[in-house]
Image: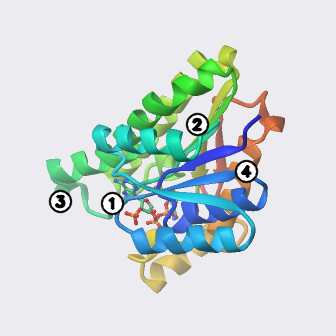
């Protein structure tokens, strides 16, 4: 099986860790980015210098035209991915009373519409070749709900419903669809949390520490492997036992 992976939102954080890890394990890595071009380019350079294969592809995943362009470029330069990691996401902390309709739409545009658009584009090849792995990054907040994150939590709950439903349809075609629900992971997304909040969160994590982007990447690597063929429609919590 060709080891080609497309990782959305791979310029930073969890996506970037997935890119490095998958490259180490012999995958040719398509790094999607939106705004962080320099970071994406330097990540691709690093992978190539370490003997891996990677290319960068710019697209706002919530825009179907940009995803169409990315799809064409990926097909030409890179080959069709047999693994798609829908990782790109945004978050925001706000009281429910302060969330505007535009905040709500932005959240859903990236976190779930973007996933829908990418699956529409990249799934048909997987079905044709009767093999594929789709890994959708949700969140523990999508399971338990997070205070001051109604729009984020709702979008991440939608990711789970989406994945479970799609998994039913694709199972006989050899395409698995699973979710990872990270807990509290040290990336830029956590930058808005103050020290006190981080300490409170740490105390709530049975493992006693904040997770790393690598912790999530290793889970994704397993779900992407041929060894995980009998696992589909699942949500894997990578959160050190964090509350669900
Ligand atoms: P991050 O460090 O903020 O990185 C977010 C990534 O998403 C960036 O590479 C960014 O690309 C990309 N992105 C954002 N909007 C995009 C768009 N419209 N099109 C394409 N790419 C876009 O976040 P992270 O912590 O690694 O989060 C990755 C995923 O894990 C997200 O889905 C997040 O919800 C989920 N998650 C994170 C945590 C956590 O504690 N960190 C916990 C649970 C779930 P550019 O910079 O190039 O624009």
Instruction: State the image coordinates of residue 136 (x, y, percent, origin top left).
Output: 55, 42
Mark 4 vs mark 1, foreground winner is 4
Instruction: State the image coordinates of residue 169 (x, y, percent, origin top left).
Output: 57, 16
Q: Marks 1 and 4: in contact by CB < 8 Å?
A: no
Of the numbered discs 2 and 3, the one sitting upstream in the chain is 2
Instruction: State the image coordinates of residue 116 (x, y, percent, origin top left).
Output: 41, 33
As measured in the structure, the alpha-carbon distance from the residue carrying label 2 to the one carrying label 4 is: 18 Å
As measured in the structure, the alpha-carbon distance from the residue carrying label 1 to the one carrying label 3 is: 9 Å
Of the numbered discs 4 and 1, the one sitting upstream in the chain is 1
Question: In the displayed structure, does residue 19 sit left or right of residue 26?
Answer: left
Of the numbered discs 3 and 4, the one sitting upstream in the chain is 3
Q: Which residue position is annotated with label 1? A: 148
Can you tell me whether the CB of the residue at mark 4 lies under 8 Å from the nearest atom of ligand 1? no
Q: Is residue 197 above or below residue 111?
A: below
Q: Which mark is residue 221?
A: 4
Of 13 and 149, the residue lying toward us: 13
Q: Secondary structure at mark 4?
A: helix
């Amino acid at each position: 099986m060709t080891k080609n992976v497309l990782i959305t939102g791979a310029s930073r954080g969890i996506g970037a860790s997935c890119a490095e890890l998958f490259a180490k394990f012999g995958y040719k890595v398509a790094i999607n980015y939106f705004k962080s071009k320099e970071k994406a380019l330097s990540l691709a350079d690093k992978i190539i210098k370490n003997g891996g294969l990677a290319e960068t592809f710019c697209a706002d995943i919530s825009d179907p035209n940009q995803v169409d362009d990315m799809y064409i470029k990926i097909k030409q330069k890179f080959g069709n991915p047999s693994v798609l990691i829908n990782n790109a996401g945004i978050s925001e902390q706000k009281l429910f009373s302060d969330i505007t309709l535009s905040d709500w739409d932005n959240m859903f545009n990236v976190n779930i519409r973007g996933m829908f658009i990418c699956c529409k584009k990249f799934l048909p090849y997987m079905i044709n070749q009767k093999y594929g792995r789709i890994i959708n990054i949700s969140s523990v907040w999508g399971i338990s709900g997070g205070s001051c994150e109604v729009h984020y939590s709702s979008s991440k709950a939608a990711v789970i419903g989406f994945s479970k439903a799609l998994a039913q349809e694709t199972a006989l075609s050899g395409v698995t669809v699973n979710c990872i629900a990270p807990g509290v992971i040290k990336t830029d997304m956590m930058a808005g949390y103050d020290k006190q909040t981080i300490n409170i969160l740490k105390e709530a994590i049975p493992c006693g520490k904040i997770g790393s982007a690598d912790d999530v990447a290793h889970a994704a690597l397993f779900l992407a492997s041929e060894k995980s063929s009998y696992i589909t429609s699942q949500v894997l919590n990578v959160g050190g036992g964090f509350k669900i």
